[in-house]
Amino acid sequence: MYRRNYLYVSTENQEKVRNFRVLIGGCGLGSVIAECALRLGFENICIIDGDKVELSNLNRQNYTHNDIGKFKVDSLKSRLLQINSRARIKAIQEYLRIDNINNFLNNDFELAINTIDFTSDIPFLFDEICCKNNIPVLHPLNLGWGAAVIIINQHSQKLTELNPEYSGFELNMAQHIVKKLKQEHRVPEYLPCIIEEYSKVRKQGISPPQLSVGSWLAASMCSSLMYHMCLKNDLRVFPEIYFEAI
């Protein structure tokens, strides 16, 4: 099914991608990343999440009305296998918690993608355990008309060096991204305004605004970075960022 990848991906590299072992923690934004990665050729994917699909997910996540009320991992696995029935998709219907996270983040994987909501310190712990096991981590961020991805590994800075508090961390990350983009003179006009407006309402418990555009940009960036990591190419790590916007 990957014949149209020719010229971009060699036969040898396509086989490397096929066998590259990936863990996706969180099946919100992770649902879009999983499909983009699968269509590129990543066929060995483990997805983990205990959440169910809600109506409010449908503006940006890879689900339909028929999935509402179902576990995200079950719906996502079914969709991925409809795209490629030979793919090795493992679905784990669990929330990652302090008492179980070590059971899942092990040397079975060569790369992890952290799309867990910052409603606890689990995203920080996810990175910490992966780094101990020498598993690099991608952190994508949906920024509406744009998206960013950072890489955490044994040589990078850690997210807790930016801010050790998980509450409101998405806002802290967005502010960090704007700071880095200012250094490169490429801050999109819309982003500082969105950050300012969201900072006013965040304490009311309102989730950050997100668009489908940001989800698909994040997915394409993650899939490209996964490809380069599979081939062991050098990449920029946190506090450096990857960013794209429309």
Image (cartoon, rainbow, N blue to C red):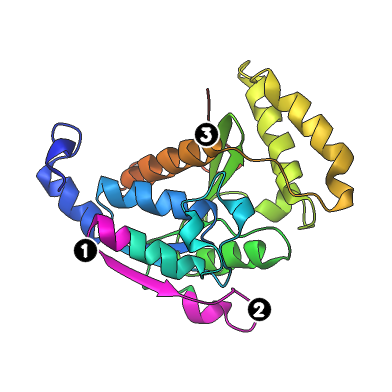
Q: Indicate the quadrant where residue 55 lies.
A: bottom right
In this image, 76 relative to 55: left or right? left
Residue at the spot of label 2: 98
Q: Position of residue 174 (x, y in %)?
A: 70, 37
- Residue 99 percent location from the top left of the image: 63, 84
Residue denoted by label 3: 213
Relative to 148, does residue 14 appear above or below in the rendering?
Answer: below
Element under label 3? helix
- Residue type, mark 2 in image: Ile
Question: Which residue is rendered at x = 71% and y = 47% of the image?
Answer: 170
Q: Residue at horizontal 32%, vertical 59%?
A: 80
**The one of 170 and 231 positioned closer to us in this rendering:** 170
Residue stretch in magenta: 80-104
Sequence-wise first label, 2 or 1: 1
Q: Earlier in the sequence, mark 3 or mark 1?
A: 1
Indicate whether 239 appears above or below 100.
above
Q: Mark number for residue 85?
A: 1
Residue 34 relative to residue 164: left or right: left
Residue nearest the viewer, comparing 78 with 223? 78
